[in-house]
Amino acid sequence: MLSRFTRLGTTLPRILANSGVRFVSQSQKSASAGSATLSELLPPQDSHDHGEVNHYVKNPDYHGFSTDPVVDQWNMRLAFFFGVSVVLVIGGTFIHYLPDYGMRQWARREAERLLKHREAKALPLIAEDYYDSSKIVLAAAGED
Amino acid sequence: MLKILIPTLFLLPTTWLTSSKWLWPTALTQSMLIALGSITWLNNTTDTGWTALNSYIGTDPLSTPLLVLSCWLLPLMLLASQNHLSSEPINRQRMYITLLATLQLFLILAFGATEMIMFYVMFEATLIPTLLVITRWGNQTERLNAGTYFLFYTLAGSLPLLVALLMLQNNTGTLSLLIIPYAKPLLLMPFGSKIWWAACMIAFLVKMPLYGMHLWLPKAHVEAPVAGSMVLAAVLLKLGGYGMMRLMIVLDPLSKEMVYPFIVLALWGVIMTGSICLRQTDLKSLIAYSSVSHMGLVAGGILIQTPWGFTGALILMIAHGLASSALFCLANTNYERTHSRTMLLARGLQIALPLMTTWWFIASLANLALPPLPNLMGELMILTSLFNWSAWTLILTGIGTLITAAYSLYMFLMSQRGPLPQHMLALPPSYTREHLLMALHLIPLLLIILKPALLWGWFAC
């Protein structure tokens, strides 16, 4: 049984050529005797979905976009070109070459420059207080 | 900003004026060009943080990743919906694309808004196209109930937000996001200010969703068609996170006590919804609950208001947006073949559709936060900042991570491994469109590994 699945590619056209319209009905007795048909387990759906139409019958190069083969192929080309080549590649290149995103390289250079300057002048390398303590206004004791 | 907004707006005439043969390729091409344009917003080197700024809209490192994600999602939604809509009347197809495009427009305006009332109006406006998509194009009768839950949960949460924003406008004289961080702390009555805090936050907590108020999410995600699920999971939940991050700055001294119950709920929700995932029979419901779980972690990260918490939250939002949307697309490929969401009915797919298994594998690994994907980076940053806030949270987040890995693997093994059921001999092979859709979800996720600084917001800079 399982070995049949590895040959699904070649089994399919044989079943399709023989069974006619409904892809799911396996009318030949030899190939899949005893297996339940899809139509038994899943009753026909709403009116717009007449069973499982296999698009590969009419268009072996079906890409999943449209039943019209020309539109299907062009849609595939457009989707791949704009999706991959334009957005992912060109967009990705744009992102890669963004200058100093978030100014991190600048921050590093600035820090090194300030350190060099402060070491040369023998100033403290960093102020201990984060805020300027003269600007902090504290409430007098006893007030709320 | 206008070079993105005008093409998005003109996607509406495009859908109504294009011939029915070329409708989908044209809409797809235009939306991809809009996505390309949105990447230019990432060019952000200013010290002030805000770029593309005018009186009404602007972008900053917090909103830019979310904007790029929403713009990228529209072509993916179109790719995903093309097949299941192909049998519908052409005007219904046009209407569907119109709804997605208007949703996109509102989302861009929401994330780009510099003024809180504009953000609020756009936040509410996104509800309408989403509601229409869920209730008119959903597949089961439960979609009406789902739409009701979705609409009223969010509205009930956001009406107090309107009052709170008006109060804030009264007090500070402005609601501009550029000025609000520098406004004086508000002087309000002791109890009234707590109510005001809750009014500000509840809308976003319901949207995220927080565990106790999450009931709308599984319904809405499951009943929505694939594009609805994608946009809900990827972007609309993040509106909640984004709103919270913006408002947290204003709410400051109050938040010290007020966040406690919500952090607890969020972390408990991570574990609870993760455990619910392990017991799900419906594939879309599993992915929906997994969204609640991840968003619980994001909510926890935002509520503790530390730089790493915010950064981790933003990274996880973007990474989860891509991964969760990818999982919904995969679930849809199953659904289009079997017309059922029951996982037991679609087992052993690795034998029948081996190439799709690759995508299932990568998406499941992304969901369980495999390094070096950004999902892990976000989760780890939130985990460590929560641990810094309180060591006990490690128990909850650790168990949560474990359960996340468990249900992601469960989902993968249930759908791909095991015996192929007898009734599934007649599955059409995977289409090029489906492979492209999955690639366009997961390749950006992998590319983010190379430049994660894009997602750090202005907290970790």
Image (cartoon, rainbow, N blue to C red):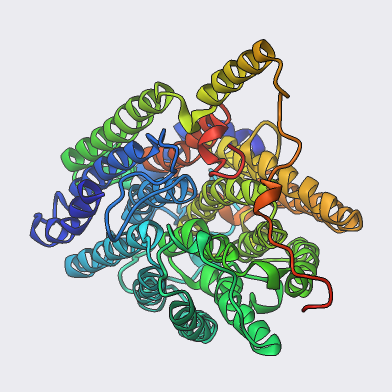
Percent from the top left, x then y, of residue A45?
41, 71
| Residue B394 vertical position relative to residue A59 in the rendered view, above or below | below
* Image coords of residue B381 (percent x, y): 72, 44
Q: In which quarter of the image is residue B116?
A: bottom left
- The residue shown at (27%, 30%) is A81
The one nearer the camera, B12 or A65, is B12
Vertical placement of B202 versus B333: above or below?
A: below
Position of B383 compared to B364: left or right?
right
Residue shown at the point (65%, 10%) measured from the top left: A120
Q: Position of residue B353 (x, y in %)?
A: 54, 40
Q: Front-most of B293 and B275?
A: B293
Q: Quadrant of residue B440?
A: top left
Q: In this view, does B393 lie to the left or right of B383?
A: right
Examine the rendering and report whether any part of residue B345 can be seen. Answer: yes
Residue B130 versus residue B83 in the image, above or below: below
Question: Residue, x 70% and y 86% (percent of image)?
Answer: B190
Task: Judge whether residue B420 can be spotted in this image.
Answer: no
Which image quarter is the C terminus of chain B in?
top right
- Foreground residue among B162 and B103: B162
Q: Tell me how many marks there are.
A: 0
Left/right placement of residue B230 relative to residue A113 reads left
Q: Residue B437 appears in which quarter of the rendering? A: top left
- Pinpoint residue B348: horizontal percent, then vertical percent: 66, 46
Looking at the picture, tell me which residue is in the foreground, B293 or B238.
Answer: B238
Q: Which residue is drawn at 34% across and 54% down?
A: B83
